[in-house]
Amino acid sequence: MSTATTPPRQHRYRRRADMPLLGGIRPPIVLLLILLLAVAAITALAVGGLRVDDTPQALRESHQYAAEDTAASLRAGLHESATDLRRAAAHYDGAPADPAAVLSTLGQAYRKWRGTVIVRPDTGRLLAARGETVPLAGLDLGKVTDTAPAPLLAPSTAGTRLLTFALVSTRTDGRALLVASDNLRLPGIATRREQTVQVLDAAGAVLDTAGAQLAADPDRRLVDSAREHAAHQRPAPGETASGSLAGSPDDKGVRRVAGYAAVASPDGRDLAAPLGLTVVSTSTVDGRTGSLRHPMLGLASAGALLAVALLLAWLLTRTLQRPLLRLFLESRRLTRGERLDEPVAGPRRGEAGRITRALEELRRQLLDPARPATAPAPRRRRPGTALPLALSAAVVLGWSGPLLFLGGTDGEVLVPNQVVAAQRDRTDTAADRVRQALNEGYADLRSIAPALARASVGQAETVLRATLAEHDRYRALYVLGADGEVLARAGEPPHRTGRPALGPSGVLLLNTSGKEPRIAARAALTAAPAEPAEGGAPEAAGPVVVGELRTDFLPALLTRPGLGRVWLLDDRHRVLAANEGYSSFGELPDGRASAVLAKAGKEPAADVVRAGGDPAVLAAAPLGGNGAVARLGWSVVTDQPVSWLHLDQNRADRRAVLAGMLGLAAAVLCLGWLFIAVGLPLRRLAASAEALAAGDRRTVLYPVHHDEVGAVARSLELIRQDLERAARRAPTATATH
């Protein structure tokens, strides 16, 4: 009866064993081959197909950044000029003065305007004038009511003038219109011999030029094209309209590149928006600035990876897939009872070899059920599936490793001289931006000094609070008496008081140590401040007004895109401010900058430093110039790592590193899949097969997955059932005999 019911149940198991194997060892091997071939194609196209640009992106960006820096300085200057004029006029709201006296006081406090006038807006009658003639022809002054007009550009016999307006109270004519005229000048910027920086109005007229003059028509057309791009560009929120262009090369391969930036702020709500100004920076390029360290790297790497992919597919198929398939066929032969007199011919090494020896012992037990169960003879353990997987991983790592380390070879990247010069010029522009901000802060105090000198304590605090609200540069404003006592203040408490706080007018450093450098401006309270001495400032006689700058004011001036790390240093080369984390009054993080500082002297300097650390473009520029900061001896230092520059070689290295990471990721994914889906189950199955051969008939072998390993496990389970039935029949047969 038992014999009659056995075949159908065995037949059911055999049908499941013949099912198509959709999982198992085949998919990860095929996927690995496909992924590595895809990475090889990516490497050939992205690295091998990289086109060397005769106008590297780093060079084009240097002009874009130069235009953005100039536009930002120009925008800040326009805002500062309008604010200074309106604040100076507001001092006479409660104490009207003669128009001539107003212009005289204004000229002594500020020397930034070429001409100033006061007129009656209703009649246009001139009340007072100072300096050059202010072009008022064509202006509709009758529309002026309680609000001063926005700045505008007006033509004159001497060129285009920028007119700034404010309402001022006069003693005899009431509210009058104060008008200041000046050239629309580019801020203090350094330019290379072949570089040209221009500011253009909405119609394309050139208002000011720095550097070389443009004479050729193609060059002027490139500038006009840059202005049109800025006018029609729709930047993302919070960004200004800016970009770069490259002109067509001439017969000698020389072409001109241009960077442009709109002067208007990103929100378009500042005083510069109605003017429609655009800054354009251009220079010539010789067409030989791009270069690659290894031009054939991409194609060679792709070819090597193609060979690696084919090698791994052959290795894994030969060492894993074929032995596992042989195991499956041999185990199925035993379950069918076919050719039991033939030894099991399977793999001899690793987990598959252990299962082969267990199957051989089980074959003998199937031939002779009375044969005592014995475990296969133990052998020295050898690496199984882990060995081919480890070899495959090592081969892929041998291909990816050199590509992954290309990012650390910046010392061989050639930096174009124009990029180094652009870093020097931008550092000089940053120094000029700091110098102007400090001089403006000192000029603010000089402008309010006459009003504070004749004001009561309450009125002085009102003036200080109004000045603090108008300018975001101050953390504290206060007036110190003859003995250094605080007479009036606004904002935070003073850092230092008493007689040591008194001293000459100008910009100064209040401390030499501590958590935060305290930078301030100081001006004497005199009705008419004396002219500063050459290279310095007048001595403070009597009470003084002091304005302490906010700690984050100067770091904000140093923060510009594409400039790298920026530091402001005092005369002893200690850090006063930076665009990223820094230690107050500490040394420069990069000691290599000392050589560039020594080279700078009174002129900006830059160099590519490769020794002693990661290669970087270091530049230094003194604040210098005229005004209140000339005697400080401060300087600005920038550090731009070579790896941050958008050069062809850096781009090729990054793409090569990406290719290496993709190849390594493909290997980890597929080889890890093989180890988890095949290696570990096969190791557990080898232990179960040896236990079954040793006589363990109680443990049922369940296939975990419907794959090659699962098929072998099903075959072993059928063998276990056959041996168990044979063991039950043996006592019955003995009792019958």
Image (spheres, helix red, strand yellow):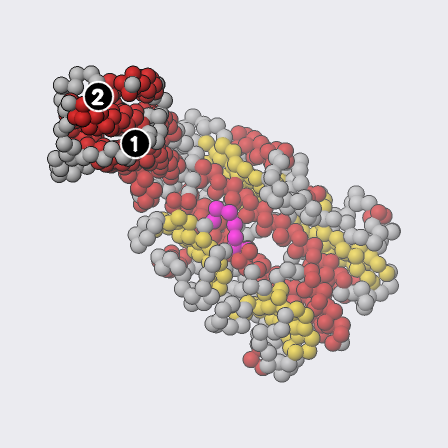
Check residue 452 in the rendering and tell me which mark sits there, or answer none: none
Q: Nearer the viewer, residue 691 or 181?
A: 691
Mark 1 or mark 2: which comes first in sequence? 2
Q: Is residue 29 visible?
A: no
Q: State whether residue 247 appears in this view.
A: yes
Mark 1, Cα crowd under 10 Å, few <14 / some 14-19 / many 20+, is: some
Q: Position of residue 240 (x, y in %)?
A: 60, 42
The type of residue carrying mark 1 is: Leu
Circle 2 sits on which residue? 334
Crowdedness near tag 2: few (<14), some (14–19) or many (≥20) residues, C-alpha within 10 Å: many
Question: Position of 518 compared to 170: left or right?
Answer: left
Quadrant in the rendering for residue 366: top left
The prevailing secondary structure element of the residues shown in magenta is loop
Which of 429 and 314 lies nearest the eye of the viewer?
314
The image shows residue 256, relative to residue 718, as above or below, that is below
Element type at mark 1: loop
Asked whether 523 or 44 is in front, the reply is: 44
Say whether residue 209 is left or right of residue 135. Answer: left
Task: Report whether 321 appears left or right of 600.
Answer: left
- Residue 635: % across, % down: 46, 60
Q: CA distance from mark 1 to mark 2?
A: 16 Å
Q: Which residue is mark 1?
A: 701
Q: Position of residue 517 (x, y in %)?
A: 51, 68
Report the span colored magenta: 557-563
Question: Residue at (55%, 52%) from the top-left corner?
Answer: 188
- For the C terminus, the quadrant is top left
Q: Is residue 421 above or below residue 513?
A: above
Report the side of 697 relative to 416 (left or right). left
Relative height, residue 515 to residue 718 (above, below): below
Q: Which residue is found at the position 18% from the left and 30% from the top?
A: 358
